[in-house]
Amino acid sequence: MNEERKQELIKTANEVRKGIVTAVHSAKSGHPGGSLSAADMLTYLYFEEMNIDPADPKKADRDRFVLSKGHIAPALYSVLANRGFFSKDDLTTLRHTGSYLQGHPDMKHIPGVDMSSGSLGQGLSAAVGMALAAKLDGKSYRVYAMCGDGEIEEGQIWEASMFASFRNLDNLTVIVDNNNLQIDGAIDEVCSPYPIPEKFAAFGFNVISIDGHDFDEIEKAIENAKATSGKPTAIIMSTTKGKGVSFMENQCGWHGKAPNDEEFEVAMKDLED
């Protein structure tokens, strides 16, 4: 990736992070930590990689994205707003009564959302179904699913993975946001899913481990996934929970808590700087 384009993506990801913090602060509830850790990958997918059109969110040949860890909806909403699917001003209505921006993604009311999600473990199964449908229909669109590292403690993740491998769904890319923290603490202290790469490899996946905040590594991983034939790909991205906000980074307490007014000002200054 050339340096100019990389800097553009870094700036866009920073705007996405500002949108996340703004939305959660306005809602006085939500999940900022995992939203911030996923922002770079989401930025790359929506601004660089995926075949999508904000003017035609349901176009038949679009690439699909499923946010299996649906509680980080602020990240998805912010990237969709910055990409032009709806107004960035609407981010301040997150979780408000009457707002279409619910606490978890809703495919019936939010432009650009391909699957309603939030019940952990189930989103990957939906993504697998989409990838299988593309194969059966002879379509070329690709399907991306993002899971949390705590989420993959759910057994349904592995049932879906077994099926994806058995059906040779090489149009499916599973992205695991490995920020090492879930709501109750470090994942290896709650119910360790480690080693994650070896588990996906055992289920027949092409596995790639990357720094989830490095756009060069993200690009190489996505290109590797597209070039892989006969098996699905799992990208295990090492990230920092709360990335970009000094007092949120690597703090599990910010898994599901909104900043107050003073904390909001500090967070936005961090991102401005």
Image (tube, helix red, strand yellow):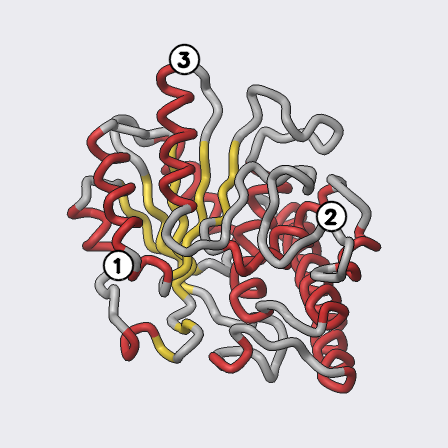
Image-based side of 154 in relation to 199, left or right: right
Image-based side of 236 in relation to 93, left or right: left
Image disc number at residue 138: 3
Image-based side of 180 in relation to 19, left or right: left
Secondary structure at numbered mark 1? helix
Secondary structure at numbered mark 3? loop
Mark closer to the chain start, 2 or 3: 2
The quarter of the image holding the C terminus is bottom right
**Percent coordinates x, y for residue 27 in the rendering:** 72, 68
Q: Amino acid at mark 2?
A: Ala
Mark closer to the chain start, 1 or 2: 2
Distance CA(mark 3)–CA(mark 1): 32 Å
Q: Which residue corresponds to the image point at 57% horizontal and 62% vertical from the top-left?
A: 35
Count neighbours of disc 2 (C-alpha within 10 A) and say few if under 14, some if 14 to 19, many if 20 or more: many
Work out whether residue 180 or residue 255 is closer to the camera in this orientation and state it.
Answer: 255
Count neighbours of disc 1 (C-alpha within 10 A) and say few if under 14, some if 14 to 19, many if 20 or more: some
Image disc number at residue 81: 2
Image-based side of 157 in relation to 89, left or right: left
